[in-house]
Image: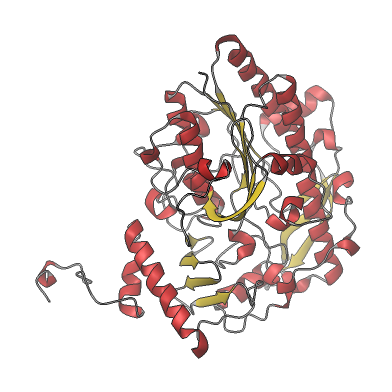
């Protein structure tokens, strides 16, 4: 029996509330709507860390960031390693070993020196965190089609605290849709798809084809058709725009200043969100082009299909942009939509799931030993409508971006705990305060639940082997001393 083909679509910095399958009734994403109608939408789907490179390395290896140790984007490296060590496995190599053709069109961003090809992908290497519009292949593609060069106008920027112009947030692209980098990625994926479909029909060789878009990551540089697709007057600003940072780690207010939120007026904030929505629709259209060709070639209906993102985006929530050292749902909860091979029941599921579970699911579909994915669990039983024993809480981590900043997060059905060793800890009631505006960590009435979550996070970190737990041993009420906290042999026999 031929192993199932697989399509994997990954976006970058993508909020769940931009998608109709997650409740948005304005944004148009017909292809993703179609996928959701044929598979499972995970309502509590998370990234293991809200930063590109570590999250993508976790997807590739099936390991949590503390385990694979690729902890920061190389462009903003803060002293961490810049590439995965050779001993770390990758699902792409495992698929190769199982006889798959394995392709990637688009963003890599898993280290500085080792490319996608080094990990078994057929790929054109693309550097960096944003559309690499200086890529020679893109320039040649434009020239061959007689399309205009990449050029921006009407830039939107705030003002940095030092008075200089802030980071570019959005701009109009002086190109038509047919010249965008997203269209270029779609064409690359379609060309690879045609090649793979030919060998599949000829000799049954299965394939895994990933298309990784660089958007809707800011800056939202779009042609007029998508820049103006949505009316800013239809945009409802995030409720957390009321953020005061009272009782929060000071780094959040600093980050807000860095991203210049308070230097932008309300109309600009609405326009940024409207442009972000346009970016989402533009990407959905390109995904739809790939799917249409896959259907024409007869390789889609029986395939497994995955859609997710590496992490979320603030777009003004909590008076922030981008992502960073603030473990809010806006950047940790991400889209997770999966159709098993041949389709499954259309359903929304509330189980905690994440990118590493996608790695495990890919492995089970291809017949790869589940032990190859140490920190993920296959979603196939859930995708087929069953209710297997499952985790009732979720742990995420962060290590820094621009500067080192270690954090650990525990989410349960109602509450979220965040431990910030250099600052104040955070505790949120996600039912009473879904926008995470009030830090209840110091509230006396929350002490019992808070301490229970501290103890649970401590246990989970010890179970995982994440040495962050050593900080918690002495600082919080997490249980009696049952190991040598000094890590010195002189205490081994101490009662």
Q: Nearer the viewer, residue 116 or 6?
A: 6
Residue beneath the point at 50% across and 23% down: 100
Vertical placement of residue 196 versus 324, above or below: above
Q: Position of residue 102 (x, y in %)?
A: 54, 26
Relative side of 79 to 330, left or right: left
Looking at the image, residue 239 sits to the left or right of residue 308; the answer is right
Could you say which is closer to the camera, residue 297 or residue 15? Answer: 297
Q: Is residue 411 left or right of residue 432?
A: left
Q: Is residue 341 above or below residue 132?
A: above
Task: Say whether residue 480 is visible.
Answer: yes
Q: Position of residue 478 (x, y in %)?
A: 34, 76
Asked whether residue 467 appears in the rendered view, the answer is: no
Q: Identify the coloring.
A: secondary structure
What residue is rendered at 58% in x and 76% in y? Answer: 429
What percent of the width, then of the height, locates residue 418?
49, 71
Residue 293 picture location, percent across and down:
74, 24
Residue in the image at 81% along x and 50% along y = 278
Q: Quadrant of residue 231?
A: bottom right
Q: In the image, what residue occupies the spot 54% across and 61% down?
A: 402
Relative to the observer, which residue lies in front, 386 or 231?
386
**Front position in the image: 378 or 173:** 378
Tag count in the figure? 0
The single residue placed furthest to the front in the displayed view is 386
Which residue occupies the extreme top position in the image?
202
The C terminus appears in which quarter of the rendering? bottom left
Q: Is residue 409 left or right of residue 238?
A: left
């Amino acid at each position: 029996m031929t192993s199932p083909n697989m399509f994997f679509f990954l976006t970058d910095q993508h909020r769940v509330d931009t998608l109709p399958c997650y409740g948005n009734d304005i944004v148009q994403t017909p292809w993703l709507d179609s996928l959701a109608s044929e598979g499972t939408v995970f309502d509590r789907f998370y990234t293991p860390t809200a930063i590109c490179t570590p999250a993508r390395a976790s997807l590739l290896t099936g390991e949590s960031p503390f385990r694979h140790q690729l902890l920061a984007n190389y462009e903003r490296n803060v002293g961490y390693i810049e590439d995965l060590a050779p001993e770390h496995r990758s699902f792409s190599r495992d698929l190769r070993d199982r006889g798959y053709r394995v392709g990637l069109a688009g963003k890599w961003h898993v280290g500085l020196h080792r490319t996608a090809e080094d990990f078994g992908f057929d790929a054109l290497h693309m550097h960096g965190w944003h559309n690499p519009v200086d890529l020679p292949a893109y320039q040649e593609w434009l020239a061959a089609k007689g399309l205009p060069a990449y050029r921006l106008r009407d830039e939107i920027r705030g003002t940095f605290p030092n008075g200089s112009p802030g980071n570019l947030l959005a701009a109009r692209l002086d190109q038509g849709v047919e010249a965008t980098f997203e269209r270029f990625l779609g064409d690359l994926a379609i060309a690879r798809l045609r090649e793979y479909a030919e060998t599949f029909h000829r000799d049954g060789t299965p394939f895994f084809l990933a298309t990784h878009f660089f958007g809707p990551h800011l800056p939202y540089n779009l042609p007029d058709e998508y820049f103006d697709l949505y009316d800013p007057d239809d945009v409802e600003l995030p409720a957390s725009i009321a953020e005061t940072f009272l009782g929060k780690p000071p780094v959040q207010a600093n980050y807000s200043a860095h991203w210049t939120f308070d230097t932008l007026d309300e109309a600009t904030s609405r326009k940024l969100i409207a442009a972000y929505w346009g970016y989402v629709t533009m990407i959905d259209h390109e995904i739809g082009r790939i799917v249409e060709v896959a259907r024409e070639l007869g390789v889609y209906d029986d395939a497994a299909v995955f859609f997710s993102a590496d992490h979320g985006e603030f777009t003004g929530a909590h008076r922030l942009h981008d992502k960073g050292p603030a473990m809010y749902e806006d950047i940790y909860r991400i889209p997770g939509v999966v159709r098993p091979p041949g389709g499954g029941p259309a359903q929304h599921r509330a189980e905690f799931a994440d990118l590493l579970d996608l790695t495990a699911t890919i492995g089970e579909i291809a017949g790869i030993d589940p032990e190859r994915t140490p920190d993920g669990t296959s979603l196939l039983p859930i995708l087929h409508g069953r209710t297997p024993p499952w985790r009732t809480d979720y742990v995420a981590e962060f290590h820094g971006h621009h500067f080192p900043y270690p954090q650990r997060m525990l989410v349960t059905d109602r509450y979220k705990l965040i431990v910030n060793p250099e600052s104040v800890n955070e505790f949120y009631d996600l039912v009473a305060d879904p926008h995470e505006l009030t830090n209840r960590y110091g509230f006396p009435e929350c002490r019992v639940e808070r301490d229970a979550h501290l103890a649970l996070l401590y246990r989970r970190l010890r179970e995982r082997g994440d040495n962050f737990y050593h900080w918690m041993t002495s600082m919080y009420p997490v249980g009696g001393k049952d190991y040598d906290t000094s890590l010195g042999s002189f205490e081994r026999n101490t009662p």
